Image: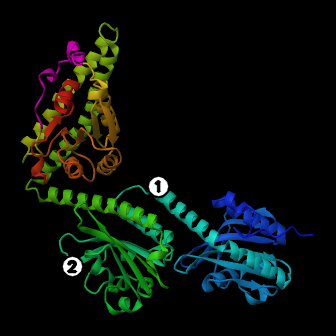
Amino acid sequence: MSEPMVAAPGGGAEPDPWALLGGRAYCEALVEQLSRQFGADFVAIGDRRIGAVDRVRCLVSRFDGLPVDDLDMECEATAAGEVLRQGRVQVTAGGVRARFPRDEICAEEGIQSYVGVALCRPDGEAMGLIQAAWRRAVPADLCQQVAALMDAHRPRLAAEVAAMQVEAALAALAVGCDGAGTAETFGWLAEQLQRAFNARAAFIAERREETTDSYRVLACCAGGLRLPVAADAVVSFSGAPCASLRDQPEAHAARDVLEAGDWQASFAAGGAEEICALQSYLGFAIRDAEGQMIGHFALLHDRKLERGGLDNRLIEVFLARIGRDLRRRRDDRRRNEEERAAPVAPEVRSFDQLAGTVAHEFNNVLAAMQGRTELALACLGGGHPAERHVEVVAEGVQAATGLVRQLLCAGREGGDAPPEIATEIAPDTAPGTAPDPAARDAAPPPSMADRRRILVVDDEETVRRAVAGLLKLRGCDVSLADGCDAALALQGSGGPFDGAVIDMNMPGRGGWETLSQLRAAQPGLSAVMMSGFAISAADAGFPALADVQVLDKPFTKEHLYQAVLG
């Protein structure tokens, strides 16, 4: 005799057993119960994957009572595809193979009876389904019982499947793709967009800096496949559905608008006819810190695409991630243009670039070594047997500092001067001179009431940890950030700070831009800039920061304390 029918969620006065379950555990319990209670040979909960051929990926499934992993099936000409296309309940009590002769699973497994219920987004489009099948013809009333139970669980199931889809998208973004800002990264992001929102196609574009009336397509994905032929296509804003994104955060267009303009011509010319046959468009603007549009991404579909059917968290994550890569691409392009525009002979410019690159990296190493030797000497105390050995290391660091400056000077003698070199050296940091042991202990740490909160920003972990260690010796509370975005996030969650120590030369947004944005949120923030070779605030485009002190890497802790703590 069969077991009592499972109660629907919240369906009676008794405590709801389903309320104790969530996520995958809830789905597994429902699939197992349907398999045991109704004797179904196959039960599965799956999500829809739009591609060149739409598919169903089974999130949880059982075949002959046993769990099955990684089950994936095509939707075309199948019972599951019929459920997804119609977006409702499908019941076939016998004769499934005759009704769907091209359904390979039905043919291979001898399926005769089938029940499926669509799981829909808020806008009504099916994003997945729950289905059960038997190798025998089962009574129609049993099929109706199964359909009724599935339908009762449908709202909860739809929410759980949507949550699992979001988790999968966030997990993919967390792993990421190497080479931020490159063509490969934008292609990968277009794939993630199309998959995460289950749209028929998606593309990413940047607004061209040299003109305000067009944008450049960086990557496009349709039906799960990248379309490299569309990359770098230049499209006019005129007549395009994304034209309003220059003033608005979002843009929506239906088929009549899409067909009216010639904005798709570049896609068609490149062979991406898939883009031209779509019926709805939803675009999102990406802006920089000043609110200027720097690019956008768009989703396109062959059915109605509603904003309310999309997950807000995913939209915000994609806006932040794609925005970061667009800013890096723009910064790299500007830097390359400035280098190409410099009136210096190629061989001289190559030497200058080599000198600057070597000096920057070497100074980071020296700065970390300088900080660590200072920390070691402070911990050893006077008279320790190892003290003199550490002092010799410190002397070597200072000697290496002089060699780096000679390298930079040689680069300047070869042609026009490279970025301004910070040459101020504290009296106790002359090359070949170890720090004065007496000065190491001259200033005791402040009391708890006087502790200062300092933010250290540097893309090199060894440097920022060394600087943090020195500041902690003076009783400071130190927060660490590996770049502009991390610094702004820390300021928002843990600020305000009493001061900041920032590396001038970081990938993407450099030190001057980082400080400018920190001060926009916290006016008057005291700051010190670190650099092995410095670009003045005015030359970097931030004349309001001209009064900020610059520390030449490497520096001693006394020099750091004087600059940061006064």
Front one among 24 and 325: 24
Judged from the image, the secondary structure of the residue bearing numbered disc 2 is loop
Which image quadrant is residue 214 in?
A: bottom left
Taking the view exactly as shown, the residue that stands out farthest to the front is: 13
Residue where numbered disc 2 is placed: 213
Residue drawn at x 33%, y 43% as measured from the top left? 481
Residue drawn at x 68%, y 67% as measured from the top left? 71
Which image quadrant is residue 111 in?
A: bottom right
Which percent across, then down, holds residue 372? 31, 26
Span colored in magenta: 422-443
Residue drawn at x 45%, y 83% as measured from the top left? 274
Disc 2 crowd, CA 10 A, few/some/many (<14, 14-19, 20+) = some
Taking the view exactly as shown, the residue that stands out farthest to the right is: 1
Is residue 155 at all visible to an observer of this figure?
Answer: yes
Which percent across, then down, holds residue 514? 23, 49
Q: CA distance from mark 2 to mark 1?
A: 34 Å
Indicate left or right for 84 with 218 as reference: right
Q: Reply yes or no: does residue 128 show up in magenta.
A: no
Indicate left or right for 136 with 274 as reference: right
Residue type at tag 1: Ala
Task: Tell me: residue 546, above or below residue 229.
Answer: above
Is residue 272 at all visible to an observer of this figure?
Answer: no
Residue drawn at x 76%, y 68% as measured from the top left? 7
Task: Decide which of tag 2 and tag 1 comes sooner along the chain.
Answer: 1
Which percent across, then down, holds residue 301? 47, 82
Residue type at tag 2: Asp
Residue where numbered disc 1 is placed: 174
Task: Tell me: residue 393, above or below residue 158.
Answer: above
Front one among 269 and 495: 495
